[in-house]
Image (cartoon, coloured by chain):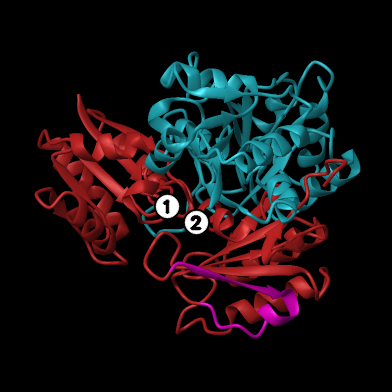
Chain colours: A cyan, B red
């Protein structure tokens, strides 16, 4: 059987991959991914045969994976974090029916919501919503609606893709929506370079967060109405008596 | 420095732990956790010194971790999935200020939303909400409100703790709320025994899901308005042209 593993690499460090992810990459004849991630693969496995397509060529990258598998090669398609959270596993499963002889298996990884939360405390320990602020593939009105619903539902919120050069004011726009339903003093944090050099985080109030410019390598966390700051960490209670 | 690692073990199998989780457990003098998880530890590391407290004694379990660390032992407190998603990292960080000399570090793991999603397809690849149906620590009205907001926001939804003997009709009640705002044909799935013997999943419509009795070892996935079933897998599009 021809095989493709869709592998979530976690935040970036070797140690943060699952053992299964490492095994599947080692087992693969070829690793396909965006260059930032195949560069990481090359650091760990210098002799691994890696292939890439540019940033916006995700569909081509997926087809490349199936074409390589069709040649009889075992393929690992790698994504950062988890391939099932703003990753390529959906696109892959959509193409799969055209390649009936190729078996596709997804290997889950630690997405930035989890690795970032572990760094900044325990912000997502109760019901939470994950929202991407990128409107490249999603209409902004839909993102606004989700921000509003997450705020009204008093979810803990994790924001992916909070900003870029082109989208410099998106975090500000998001905070303005959240501030209609959430307290200005709601604890928030930005985690940056999770699992990479320069890993760090900063705690803000929601009011302060509004004026921060966040970038590509940052993940934003916004507490619910119960979230506290304890020793500079964001902690959301679960409701235990002693909490 | 006295050390506690709060370690997310992932869904259950050794291979689904991160390398860091394995290293921290191996480095620890004592592993503390609910018996189901320390039993798993004993299967992998038969000689490991393990301590437990019963199911509802989470606070005592956390204090036990700090007391053991205070004796100079390196401690791993283990949780299933990720310790920061309905786990014990929040309770731990709340107790930590009483033990200034103990350093606490959280090691992220693969939570059931991610491992279950990898099994059933790519349901959470776009904005999603995670909601627990357990009202043990959360008022049911708050859960209802979050279900309603997640449905109105057209989030993909992952439900933890969808039912138990005492809460046999909670999934039905949840589906009734979701059905007010979501199409009855919305693709859904239940993943069971993720990463354990008997791992499996079943695809339903939201209308069908309403009549299913789900249990403790099951995780429920509900698509957004775009989610499709492809080859018996739930696939949520991200919005790519070719998708």
- Neighbor class of circle 1 (other Cα within 10 Å; few <14, some 14-19, many 20+) is many
Q: Position of residue A237 (x, y in %)?
A: 48, 50
Residue at (72%, 29%) from the top-left corner? Answer: A162
- The image shows residue A213 at horizontal and vertical percentages of 73, 18
Classify 10 Å Cα crowding around label 2: few (below 14), some (14-19), many (20 and above): many
Vertical order, B111 against A172 (above or below) = below
Left or right: where does residue B75 sit relative to residue A73? left
Quick check: A102 above or below A213? below
**Quadrant location of the N terminus of chain B in the rendered image:** top left
Q: Magenta stretch?
A: B199-214
- Res. B81 mark: 1
- Picture quarter containing residue B228? bottom right
Q: Residue at x 22, y 28 (%)?
A: B101
Residue position for label 2: B112
Residue at image location 75% in from the left, 52% down from the top: A98
Is residue A231 in view?
yes
Residue in front for this viewpoint, A214 or B13: B13
Q: The numbered mark 1 sits on a residue in which chain?
A: B
The answer to whether one can see residue A192 in this image is: no
């Amino acid at each position: 059987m021809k095989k493709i593993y869709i592998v979530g690499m976690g935040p970036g460090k070797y140690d943060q991959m699952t053992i299964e992810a490492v095994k599947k990459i080692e087992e693969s004849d070829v690793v396909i991914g965006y260059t930032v991630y195949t560069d990481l693969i090359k650091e760990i496995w210098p002799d691994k045969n890696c292939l890439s397509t540019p940033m916006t060529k995700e569909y081509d990258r997926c087809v490349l994976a199936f074409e390589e598998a069709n040649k009889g090669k075992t393929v690992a398609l790698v994504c950062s974090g988890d391939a099932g959270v703003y990753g390529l596993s959906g696109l892959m499963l959509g193409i799969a029916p055209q390649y009936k002889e190729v078996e596709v298996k997804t290997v889950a990884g630690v997405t930035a919501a989890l690795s970032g939360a572990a760094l900044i405390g325990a912000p997502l320990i109760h019901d939470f919503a994950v929202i991407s602020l990128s409107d490249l593939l999603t209409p902004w009105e839909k993102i606004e609606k989700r921000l509003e619903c997450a705020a009204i539902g008093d979810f803990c919120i994790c924001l992916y893709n909070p900003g870029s050069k082109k989208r410099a004011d998106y975090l500000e726009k998001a905070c303005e929506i959240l501030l209609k339903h959430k307290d200005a003093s709601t604890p928030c944090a930005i985690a940056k370079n999770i699992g990479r050099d320069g890993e760090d985080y900063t705690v803000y109030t929601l009011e302060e967060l509004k004026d921060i410019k966040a970038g590509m390598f940052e993940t934003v966390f916004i507490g619910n109405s119960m979230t506290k700051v304890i020793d500079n960490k964001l902690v959301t209670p679960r409701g235990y008596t002693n909490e």
